[in-house]
Amino acid sequence: MTLNAIQRSSLKRPAAGRSCEADRKVSAKRLLSRMVRIRAAVIQESQAIVEDWTPKVARRSFLPGAINLAQYLTFRRHDLSDLQHQLSALGLSSLGRSEGRVMATLDAVCARLAEMAGQSAVSFPTPLDFRNGKRILRREQARIFGDDPHGPGTRIMVTLPTRASEDRGLVADIIRAGADCLRINCAHGGPEIWAAMIENSRAAAADQERACRILMDVAGPKCRIAEVCAPKKTRLYRGDLLMLAGRMPAQLKAGDIVIRVTFPAILDQLEVGARIFIDDGRIAARVERIESDGAMLRVEQARSKGEKLRHKKGLNFPDTALDLPPLTEKDLRDLDFVAENADLVGFSFVQRPSDITLIQRELAARRGGRPVQPLVIKIETALAVRNLPDLIVHGAGQQPLAVMIARGDLAVELGFERIGEVQENILWLCEAAHVPVIWATQVLAGMVEEGAPSRAEVTDAAMGQRAECVMLNKGPFIVEAVRFLDNVLRRMDRHQSKKSARLTPLELWIEPQGARQAREAGRT
């Protein structure tokens, strides 16, 4: 059969057209009945959540996000996978992109199903109903990270090295390459260094007529290696034994390996069998026994060439419900500076709504009646993931809020095999709340450190375009990495908007007009 014959055949009405139409009407009625039930359940169940949340929402501009988040949570309690295929077969929305507009999507599908079922007309949502969630999210993105009409849709955040306090040229190069927000990690340096970093950053941004926001990230109760006692050039291998201690033992045997931790109180909370991860999971160990001087750990995972123990590297305790204050004494001292000088405040290791209430109270006490700064909460533990809806409401209900997916700690806490699933869930939840997301941890890490990215890193950076901001860490090739990321994000903007593919022409397979004309001329 020729191509023309195939095309003519596909346009013919089937012989059993009336029967097909009747089948579609029956299918539409059945699906409409199910959709109406789902819609009613979403309204009823979400109302109870909204009533609980409303007293916590002093910032009324967030109320649409809180309502939509409650609707999304109740909507996603249903298994909709089989329903999606049936709706798609009728040419309708498969409900897979409803995050920012739950009720508008449900109303649109119900209206079309009613029309197909031959029932009385149902009011169809307005275009504004569909656009409002995206509009609010973009507004919040601009409010927190600034508005750059000439840059990619996703903002770029860069962690500044300490030498940015002395090298204004470096900061200028980072901003020129495409950075929209500069991050200062309060775990390093102090007020004098931070002040110099901020002065250089604002001067460099002003010279380029750019608005570059400053995020100051208070460290929180992150347990780190405070000191290592070990033979020189020691590497840890599977099967090695080491001690976790609150202070160095008075006597050490030759060959002993001891790690002193920054939070000794953790040792009293450990139990035999508990897992401990060191340096973002590069070393995995398990508590073998508890001694008077500390906990003895047996290494269960390390590369075959071994792993070095480095000062200030983090430790994770996924099997232990750590009872630590959300703000340390150092954090409270740092907040004196942060409240006066930062554009954005980063809050590490937030886990409970009461943690957010605490930092809001501490910031308000230092702001002296001035508007509160936007808050960036870092999601780093399993408990924070479980509490995320309440964390969002407690935060965004009082001030502009962004959520950072700290994927390194999350991968260790939840298991590396789950991080892909969890980061997607967080993206969906935040879009439903109209809250911006920061895609963080080891983005283009190879390029930042070595000058060249891996294929996996480039794919990861491209995936980050679905967030409102991507964070790069410091390193010797940071300027080149920012420029590279800016290019990747611009390219992805052409093809993707959140979960939706943008059907722009596929230029890789479109023959330039001149080449086609030349080829045709060569045939004649």
Image (cartoon, rainbow, N blue to C red):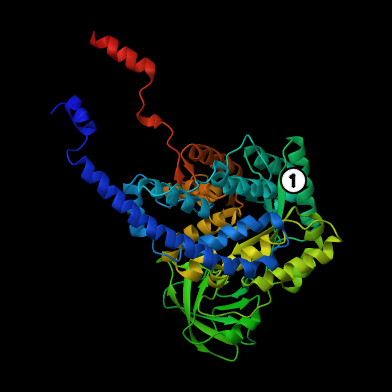
Q: Is residue 101 above or below residue 264?
A: above
Q: Quadrant of the N terminus?
A: top left
Q: Is residue 514 above or below residue 32?
A: above
Q: Who is closer to the viewer here, 48 or 316?
A: 48
| Image x and y of residue 87, in percent | 35, 51
Image quadrant of residue 210?
Answer: top right
Q: Which residue is mark 1?
A: 201
Q: Who is closer to the viewer here, 343 or 233?
A: 343
Identify the residue at image location x=17%, y=38%: 15
Q: Is residue 404 above or below residue 119?
A: below
Instruction: Specify whether residue 325 is in view.
Output: yes
| Image x and y of residue 244, in percent | 57, 80
Under circle 1, the secondary element is: helix
Q: Is residue 229 above or below residue 271?
A: above
| Image x and y of residue 22, in percent | 26, 47
Mark 1 neighbour density, 10 Å: few (under 14) some (14–19) many (20 or more): many
Instruction: Specify whether residue 279 is in view.
Output: no
Residue type at numbered disc 1: Ser
| Image x and y of residue 414, in percent | 48, 69
Q: Residue furthest top?
A: 524
Identify the residue at image location x=73%, y=35%: 208
Left/right of residue 374 with respect to residue 442 in the rendered view = right
Left/right of residue 57 with respect to residue 46 in the rendered view = right
Q: Residue furthest bottom?
A: 292
Q: Residue furthest left?
A: 1
Tally the marks: 1
Left/right of residue 279 with respect to residue 369 in the rendered view = left
